[in-house]
Amino acid sequence: MKKIMLVFGTRPEAIKMCPLVKELKNRKDFNTVVCVTGQHKQMLQQILEAFDVVPEYNLTIMKDKQTLFDVTINILERIKQVLEFEKPDIVLVHGDTSTTFVTALACFYLNIKVGHVEAGLRTNNIYSPFPEEFNRQGVGIIAQLNFAPTEWAKQNLLKENKNPESIFVTGNTVIDSLKTTIKKDYKNEYLNWANGSRLVLLTSHRRENLGQPMRNMFKAIRRVVEEFKDVKVIYPIHLNPAVRQIAHEVFDGEDRIKLIEPLDVLDFHNFMARSYLILTDSGGIQEEAPSLGVPVLVMRDTTERPEGVEAGTLKLVGTDEENVYREFKNLLINKEEYAKISKTSNPYGDGNACKRIADVLEEYFSKEEVN
Ligand code: UD1
Ligand code: UDP
C-alpha cells in the first residue's frame, strides 16, 4: 500500500486540501497521512473542524508576527523527523505558501517525491506576490507530479520545460470545497444587519500590501461608504496584528463598516454568495467568486489568476487610493458595467478536481509497480 502524506499549514491550503484528504482516505490503495505545519493556528483549526479532518501531525510552528525566517527555519527543522519516520511514497503540497516551499525543500533533501497541487500559477515577478511567486516556482523545480488547475497553468509549466507527462489539468480543488458549503437556506445575524443594503465583503492580508498600500485601499473604501448610504461593508479581519492595526485606524467610527473575526469557511462562502461586490487582495477568493457570479475588485498590481479576469468577474484595480475609489464607486453607479461583470462562469473547474488527482496518483503508482 502506498503512503501519501499531505502537508499544509494555512487557511487557504486547508480549504483546498481537506476535500483531497477525504477523497484519498476513501481510496483503499492508499495509506493517507496528514501533517499540518501550524503556520496558521486559529484560522487553520477553523477549517479542519469545518471539514472534520484530524491531522496525524501538527508541527505547531506559529508565532505572533512571525517573519519568513521564523516560518522557514521552524518548518524545516521540525518536518525532518516526521518525514524520516513516516517515509511517505509521495508528499502532496499545495500552492505557494512558505509551508509549501519549505516542505518541498525538505522532501528534496530527503529524496522524497513531491506532488504539487495548484501548480503552474505565475506572475513571473518573484516580488509580486511576495514571497508566493518564488515559492511556487521553487516547488515547480522540485515536484515530480504537477496538478495544474487550468490549461493556462499547464502552459506556464510547459514554457518552463517541465516534463509534459508530469502535468495533469484537474481543475482547482477550491471548487470541490465550494460545492459542499453553499446553502440555500443559510442565515446569519451579520447578514440580517446588512439586510436592505448592498453588501460589500472585504478581505485583505497580502504581505506586500502591509503599510501604506493597505492604508490607501482602506481610505478609498471608507470614502465611498460615506458617500453611498445604501452600502454596508463586512470585513472579517485576518488575525495578522499588522493588518488589524491599519483596519482599526482607518475604519473605526464608521458604523456601516463592520469589522468582525475571521469567518468559518461555510459562513464566508455563504456571505460571498449573498454579496453585491467583493473587494480583496486574496488569491482563493478570486477563484471562488466567478462560479458564484459575484464581481471582485482585486486590490493588487498583478494576478496569477487571469482566467477570472478574462471571464469578466475580476478586475485588477491596484492599491492606489484614487483608483480604488473610482473603480468601487463605478460598480455602485454604473449598472451596465455591474451587469457585465456579475456573470457566472467556471474557469477553475467543475468540482471534481480531487477525484482527478486521486485517479492520477492511482495510475502513477500502478505504473511504478509494473516497472
Ligand atoms: C500566509 C501566506 C500567504 C497566504 C496567507 C493566507 C506565507 C509567507 N504567507 O500569509 O501566502 O496567502 O497565509 O491567509 O506563507 N495569525 C494568527 N493566527 C492565525 C493566523 C495568523 O494569529 O491563525 C497571525 C500571527 O501573528 C502570524 C501572522 O498572522 O505571525 C502572519 O501569519 P503568516 O502565515 O506569516 O502570514 P499570512 O499573511 O497569514
Ligand atoms: N475565507 C474564510 N473566512 C474568512 C475569509 C476568507 O474562510 O473570514 C476563505 C475564502 O473563502 C478563501 C480563503 O479563505 O477560500 C482565502 O484565504 P486567504 O485570503 O487567507 O488566502 P489566499 O487565498 O490569499 O492565499
Image (cartoon, helix red, strand yellow):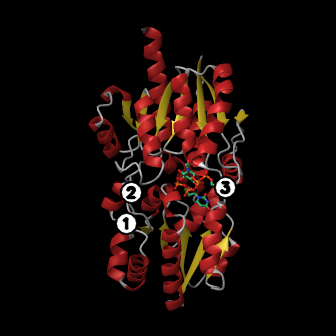
Q: Earlier in the sequence, mark 3 or mark 1?
A: 3
What percent of the width, then of the height, locates residue 308? 37, 58
Q: Could you tell me if residue 319 is visible in this image?
A: yes
What percent of the width, then of the height, locates residue 254? 62, 85
Q: CA distance from mark 1 to mark 2?
A: 8 Å
What percent of the width, then of the height, locates residue 49? 71, 48
What percent of the width, then of the height, locates residue 144? 43, 26
Q: CA distance from mark 2 to mark 3?
A: 25 Å
Front residue of 77/343: it is 77
Amino acid residing under circle 3: Lys
Amino acid residing under circle 2: Thr
- Image quarter of residue 5: top right
Judge the density around disc 2: few (<14), some (14-19), many (≥20) Cα neighbours within 10 Å: many
Helix or strand or loop: what does disc 3 sit on?
loop
Helix or strand or loop: what does disc 2 sit on?
loop
Q: Which residue is mark 3?
A: 65
**From the image, which quarter does the C terminus lie in?**
top left
Q: Earlier in the sequence, mark 1 or mark 2?
A: 2
For the residues bearing labels 1 and 2, Cβ distance under 8 angstroms? yes
Q: Quadrant of ligand 2?
A: bottom right
Numbered label tally? 3
Q: Which residue is mark 1?
A: 316
- Kindly tell me whether mark 3's CB lies below 8 Å from ligand 1: yes
- Image quarter of residue 248: bottom right
- Image quarter of residue 321: bottom left
Amino acid residing under circle 1: Leu
The residue drawn where x is 65% and y is 20% is 84
Helix or strand or loop: what does disc 1 sit on?
strand
Judge the density around disc 3: few (<14), some (14-19), many (≥20) Cα neighbours within 10 Å: few
Above or below, comparing residue 45 to residue 278 in the picture? above
Q: Which residue is mark 2?
A: 303
